[in-house]
Amino acid sequence: MTIPLTVEFAAGGQGAWMIDRIVPVFGEALPPASRLAIGAAPLAPAGSIAWRLRGTVSNARYTHRSEMTELATRQEGLGRPGSRRAALIPIRKNAAWWALAQDERRAIFEEQSRHIRIGMDYLPAVARRLHHSRDLGEPFDFLTWFEFAPGEESRFDAMLGRLRETAEWRFVEREVEIRVNLDQ
Amino acid sequence: MTIPLTVEFAAGGQGAWMIDRIVPVFGEALPPASRLAIGAAPLAPAGSIAWRLRGTVSNARYTHRSEMTELATRQEGLGRPGSRRAALIPIRKNAAWWALAQDERRAIFEEQSRHIRIGMDYLPAVARRLHHSRDLGEPFDFLTWFEFAPGEESRFDAMLGRLRETAEWRFVEREVEIRVNLDQ
């Protein structure tokens, strides 16, 4: 994959992933839809699109070298045959977060909240790809895509619960959880 | 100004700024044009467009709190009546830069290269606004816009010379200098 790569998530009547549920965690939800398509933006126009979100796979913004090295040895890629469950989690942080300096955001993100460290606890079970949306004028700042086996779903839920209790999450003003599967 | 704000720079036959010269510093130049227009993207279509570049005014990526505070007390905004000279400097860094971790990029940027510190030496004479282009699929990663009085031009040139001698600049693979004025 050549980065930066802009990816589109399109919910509607078409797409490989069946949508189980769309849950508003903070703020407004997204409209209901039955399927989710993912591809290089812009996707071919599909019949009925309920919503589209775009984000760019880009460089790391907070991760230090020691963390990148550890992640590289432990994480696995998208598209594993056993990864028949997935989640798309769009997030928008508030203006206070974006007004912080880089060292302040890093300290909240990792030294206080252990965001990278918490994610490590679920490797390699949960594969992940982050897409940056803020600079594209999108309604969310980030779109994170997670893939895992059906048997890992309760651990994935536990990971989300731990992240949402952190200091970092006090800056989240909108979050939606879109849970999908390949099995229905 | 509400950020993120995507700004377009359009060179052609229209625009408030007269183009003095377009100098390729590293890599390929940009086509010649007589005037430069700047505005919220997308600009209205003008008669003859030689090239367009877009970038988003967004959050700080390397600047620490102590540096942001010092910058805020010393820098002045764009559009000062005396700022009748300006420069647009689009830059693209190489793949090795973008593969670095956040702490490695910050160390090269400031602890080794003193990028912020060098810029401080020219405040408030040189006003500056950075636009991020990499995630937009643009040919450059950054567009920096500088404004200054005619009498400050040689000091502005000296600042560019100091920056180009730094360790950070070894990662620059394309740089073009577009010098413009309001006086012709």
Image: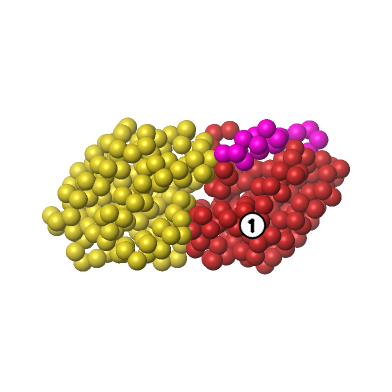
Chain colours: A yellow, B red
Q: Residue at x 24, y 39 (%)?
A: A23
- The quadrant in which the C terminus of chain A is found is bottom left
Q: Residue at x 74, y 40 (%)?
A: B123
Q: What chain does mark 1 sit on?
A: B
Q: Quadrant of residue B75 in the image?
A: top right
A156 sits to left or right of B39: left
Q: Residue at x 75, y 60 (%)?
A: B23
Relative to A111, say whether A78 is above or below. Answer: below
The residue at which mark 1 appears reads as B112
- Was residue B19 drawn as part of the magenta stretch in this picture? no
Q: Which residues are magenta?
A: B65-84
Q: Residue at x 64, y 57 (%)?
A: B112
- Was residue B68 drawn as part of the magenta stretch in this picture? yes
Q: Nearer the viewer, residue B177 or A51?
A: B177
Relative to B139, say whether A114 is above or below. Answer: above
Residue A44 % position (x, y): 35, 57
Kind of residue sitting beneath label 1: Gln
- The quadrant in which the N terminus of chain A is found is bottom left
Residue B139 % position (x, y): 58, 60
Visible residue check, residue A112: yes
Residue B73 % position (x, y): 68, 32
Identify the secondary structure beneath mark 1. Answer: helix
- Label 1 neighbourhood size at 10 Å, few (<14), some (14-19), many (20+)? few
B60 sits to left or right of B37: left
Visible residue check, residue B19: no
